[in-house]
Image (cartoon, rainbow, N blue to C red):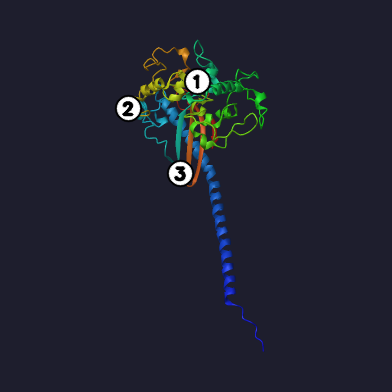
Amino acid sequence: MRLNPTPPRGFALIIVMTVIFVLAILAGGFAYSMKVETRLAANANNDSELEWMGRSGVELAKYVLDQSMRVGARYTSLNQLWAGGPGDGPETNSPLAGINLKHYVLGQGFISVHIADLERKINLNRIAGFAPGPGAGSGSELIQRALGVMGVDAAQSALISDSILDWKDTDDATGLSGTESDFYLGLDPPYFAKNGPFDDLAELLLVNGVTPQIYWGPRAPAHQRQFVATKRGRRADPGLAPTYPVGLVDLFTPISSGAVNLNTASMYVLEAALGVTDDIAANVIRTRAGLDGVEGTEDDTPFQNASLAMVPGLEAMPPTARAPLTTISSYFEVTVDVQLGNSHRECVAIVGRGIPGAVGLGSEGGVKVLQFSWR
């Protein structure tokens, strides 16, 4: 009589292990999927709260700027509370005392508010009106001066400056070294010259000759995906382009009162706006920084007016040789970093203080939101 062979025990063990392995993979995938779904649901629930926290940060910035004006600040400087300074005079005994813009607890999260005035830069839309008069130079010369401060080649500076003016003027006539729509329509993709004022400074990246390195300066490596089309529609190789210590984004703005604030402008902006060397621009910084030489501290000595008579090297400088100057800023960029648990968002607003149409607590016109966006 023949007996059926007994199947090997190892085969059954392999089947069991295979089933367990497959089930473990399915369970792990399900758990991961549930974790992702839970996170998405939490983020969706947080979206509304994150948005209102960001808007609250803008309102906090408006309050700080409004109160700073209400207490009678006669100038705008880096040692004031809005700029992260210790407070200037009356501010230290005002409702602003004790407000922490860097870590303001709000509900279950917190916000960090950064405020920067826009008068610290040169207004690109009003550049044609800068320093009218003998020896002042044209808008093109002022742009070239700024490019020279950056270290851009002189031949390239003429192309860029005239192309910027052609971009924002209202006609199709090409400047001496400029560029109009006939050039841009030959690119891939084609586009027209705007023939209007800059709404966003990033429009400069569309202007002939302006590369990401020239626009962003030392921050260009963080923006490697941005490029400027060449005449043949090819991308410029960022690895072959020179680097600059400062970019156009650090020198210009599309919105401000039109004057440059002596108390907040950087040395590079002062060089371009005043048409002076870096050592004389440094004298302006030293004059306003006080005895310790550090800006944003208690011993700062901000300019009370736009006179440069106290600055070594600028005592006899005529007003027609420079851009308009001021000591009061009216436009500010507010950046709000919002953190709620593991969720994070950032919003940016442009606000105007003491401008027509602004309504607020201050006796001089309040603060008005002009632009608002999320990053």
Question: Going 40% across and 20% down the picture, which residue do you hit?
Answer: 280
Which mark is in front, 2 or 3? 2
**Of the residues under marks 1 and 3, which one precedes in the sequence?**
3
Residue at the limit of the structure toward the front, as seen here: 240
Q: Determine which quarter of the picture holds residue 186.
A: top right
* Amino acid identity at mark 3: Gly
| CB-based contact (under 8 Å), mark 1 and mark 3 | no
**Of the residues under marks 2 and 3, which one precedes in the sequence?**
3
Which mark is in front, 1 or 2? 1
* Amino acid identity at mark 1: Arg
Q: Which residue is mark 1?
A: 145
* Amino acid identity at mark 2: Asp
Quarter the N terminus occupies: bottom right
Secondary structure beneath label 3: strand
Where's residue 135, x and y in %? 49, 11
**Of the residues under marks 1 and 2, which one precedes in the sequence?**
1
